[in-house]
Amino acid sequence: MSHVPIEVQLKTLPSNPGVYQFYDDSSTILYVGKAKNLKKRVSSYFNKKQEYGKTRVMVKKIARIDHIVVPTESDALLLENNLIKKYRPRYNVLLKDDKSYPWICIKKERFPRIFPTRKYIKDGSEYFGPYTSMKTVRTLLDLIKSVYPLRTCNYDLADEKIKASKYKLCLEYHLGNCMAPCEGLQSVEEYDRQVADIRDIVKGNFKSSLQYFKGQMKYLASEMKYEEAQLIKDKIDVLENYQVKTTVVNPKINNVDVFSIISDEAFAYVNFLQLSHGSIVRSHTLEIKKKLDEENEHLLQLAIIEIRNRFASESKELYLPFNVTVEPHLKVTIPQLGDKKKILDLSIRNAKFFRQERFKQIMILDPDRHVNRIMAQMKKDLRLSQEPRHIECFDNSNIQGSNPVAACVVFRDGKPIKKEYRHYNIKTVDGPDDFASMEEVVFRRYKRLLAEEQSLPQLIVIDGGKGQLSSALKSLDILGLRGKIAIIGIAKRLEEIYFPYDSIPLYLDKKSESLKIIQQLRNEAHRFGITFHRNKRSAAAINSELESIEGIGEKTAEELLKKFKSVKRIKEASIEELTKNVGFSKAKKIYNKFH
């Protein structure tokens, strides 16, 4: 069918729900997608100009379109997931997680053993999990063993073998870790009741265990067996303690799967919390590598199917941040307030923490990749023609017009390069005129860079709104740099970003990394400028205090400060010490002034 033109293939597509597959001219599968209406969805790839680069590249490669019609959209979703896992097409998202997870196994045997395993064997045994870490499994098993004495041996405890006294008491019995069912000292009924309680605990339900032990404790206390009653009370404390740690929501919230998603340019992170009897029995975050500009709705759909399959979830209700199509038998709740909203917020927080951890790991293991991602994001957010690898930011500092100065700070690859920072004394402007000062400094900076044939930045950030930005633009015009360097202004009050000749500012997301880097630039320029300004003002104040003495000029004041380091020491100096440096006549005047 590859010889049939794409236009013809599109015309023959049905308008039913289904799954479509794109192939290139060598019959290699490129992409699998699902649609409510196959004809509309597939045609949309070819009808509109694709904004996202990778989508454009993929569309050019499509030579053949196959499709499978299914009864409903949710069927399409399941089929799409299976085909992606089967064929792993180049342009489909990559669900990055293929490790094996631990389970808790209750072995199908007389007097069942309970142990951790990574192998799921279909032999009739019960498996609980999988758990996201072996640490969780061990914590749970330690809790169970501290409350219930269970056998750890792998003997065949058939009734006839026990009656034939085939086995002898072992150390575990003497340590109190096992009740010796091998010697007939514990009945099958009593052991099975323990296993039933353990089954509940693993599911997050501590109710029946606590009720049983509280009944036992009261009975033993009434029989005046206080030591035994205390042992039972210790077990109740262990269970209640563990339950408090795991219960984070309303105990009425039972058997619910909670999903949330956060995403950036390259990855999405889907967090899954499984709730049972008000306890979180499982938490897991799935990292999804984006290939095209996939929407969160689609990624969340895929993740829900993948995670529920992987963890064999049987929950019939989902809490989600927004509505997506799922299997018809599942109830979807989008919490707005109360305990349900709290648990959804907790899931979002888990996804964010996971993302932060991954970023930190990437920064350590592959710093270039981290920088590349941020630069690509800034280019997109600020509508730049190239990545801003070299950024310079300007800030004016003048307080009541005294000692006007300016600062220029330099960032390369999103990091400050302090040796390239520059201070400027304003030379051509009288009084506090921010706009004229900005014009002067920008002109001086880039005139010098051009004269010295140094590299120019890809982006200039001006600390200020439209006025300061216009002033800086005048200087770029004079130097012939308009259009060669991107320039923006950032206004302090609402963090508005202004572009040349655009009166409507851009508001970046407060959490965006692009805004954080611009804020860091602005704050660094401000700090650097203010420090210089303070030093100038204090030097001017010191000099003026000495120069106010009749007969003491600027040169004498500087010589004294070089020798004595501060005005305080000059004040404390004897007339003899002063005479050594400036002669008796001046020394007398200075000494008399301060004494």
Image: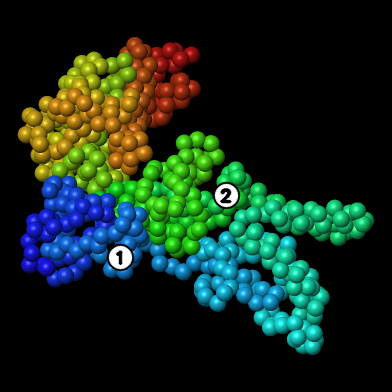
How far across and down, in percent of the image, does residue 244 sit?
Answer: 65, 48
Helix, strand or loop at label 2? It is loop
**Reading the chain from its start, which is encountered first: label 2 or label 1?**
1
Helix, strand or loop at label 1? It is helix
- Given residues 232 and 554, the one toward you in this image is 232
- Given residues 223 and 17, the one toward you in this image is 17
10 Å crowding of disc 2: few (<14), some (14-19), many (20+):
some
Q: Residue at x 19, y 27 (%)?
A: 469
Q: Which mark identifies residue 485?
A: none
Label 2 sits on residue: 254
Q: Residue at x 29, y 40 (%)?
A: 514
Is residue 557 visible in the rendered image? The answer is: no
Going by the numbered disc 2, the residue's amino acid type is: Asn
Above or below, comparing residue 65 to residue 546 in the picture: below
How far across and down, in percent of the image, does residue 53 sit?
Answer: 17, 52
Is residue 475 visible in the rendered image? The answer is: yes
Give the side of residue 177 with respect to residue 340, left or right.
Answer: right
Give the side of residue 388 with respect to residue 49, left or right.
Answer: right
Above or below, comparing residue 423 to residue 167 in the picture: above
Above or below, comparing residue 458 to residue 186 in the picture: above
- Given residues 227 and 369, the one toward you in this image is 227
